[in-house]
Amino acid sequence: MSDRLQSTRLFVEAALHAHAEIQLDNAGSHYLANVLRRGIGDVVILFNGRDGAWTAKITELSKKAVSLKPISQVAEQVASPDIWLIFVPIKRARLDFMAQKATELGVSKIWPVQSAYGQMKRINDHRLEANAIEAAEQTERLDIPEIGAFESLTALLSNWPEDRSLIFCDEGEAGATHVLPETILPPLRGKPAAILIGPEGGFSPDERRMITDMSQSVALSLGPRILRSDTAALSALSLYQAYCGDWRSL
């Protein structure tokens, strides 16, 4: 099998096992047959977030339909760290970027929320999921982050799970008091957590009060500069992975 064929990875919903027959949807069939120009007998890698990664051989192929037969499992399923990214959506192009890079950095859930100062009123969940799937396919990740339903930040915090820490990237309080990652992140290792990133206009006084009054919230400084929300999200996720996540196992 050539390295070129081995590098092709596709996410599928179907169960993967030695006796399965996988039928790709129209988009997947078009991508494999017309974009990548694969042929019958070629081998690709399939994953579904449950059964690890499998080599699979193309058994039937047309412009609109591709079937594959799983051959063997080449990687066992590995769960990503239990870290959520909660953020107030930004412009669409940067929202796509956020979903892609958060997936690459290993989040288990991507959750857009609406805040008092947020500008976007609707979210295309399917677009977010498509960006997450594409990022997972390209980075050898074996699962896809869940996409949380778009709702208000107040509603989300009102039903916050008691056992999940909320890492609040607060440019006001945390930046002023220099709450550094080596101080707050190590105690969160191995525990459910979430990172909260606000809009570029910040949180309203009521939202800030609600966040800081939560027993699960901890403020984190991201340095002396004011970061754009997508930069802040990636910076916070990188810090979390370095101190608490699966980077520590490398």
Image (tube, grey):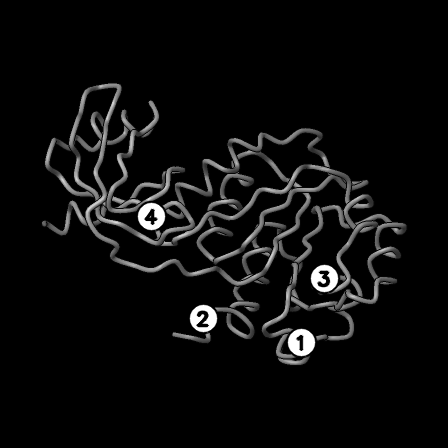
* Residues at marks 3 and 1, CA–CA distance in whole angstroms: 15 Å
Secondary structure of the residue carrying tag 3 is strand
The type of residue carrying mark 1 is: Leu
Along the line of sight, which residue is nearer the eye, 88 or 247? 247
Q: Is residue 246 above or below residue 32?
A: below
Along the line of sight, which residue is nearer the eye, 163 or 172? 163
Residue receiving disc 1: 180
The type of residue carrying mark 2 is: Trp
Is label 2 or label 1 in front? 2
Along the line of sight, which residue is nearer the eye, 75 or 103? 75
Q: Is residue 211 above or below residue 187?
A: above
**N-terminal-most mark, 3 or 1:** 3
* Residues at marks 4 and 3, CA–CA distance in whole angstroms: 29 Å
**N-terminal-most mark, 3 or 2:** 3
Q: Residues within 10 Å of mark 4 (few under 14, many from 20)?
A: few
Residue receiving disc 2: 247
Q: Residues within 10 Å of mark 1 (few under 14, many from 20)?
A: some
**N-terminal-most mark, 2 or 1:** 1
Q: Residues within 10 Å of mark 2 (few under 14, many from 20)?
A: some
* Residue 166: numbered disc: 3
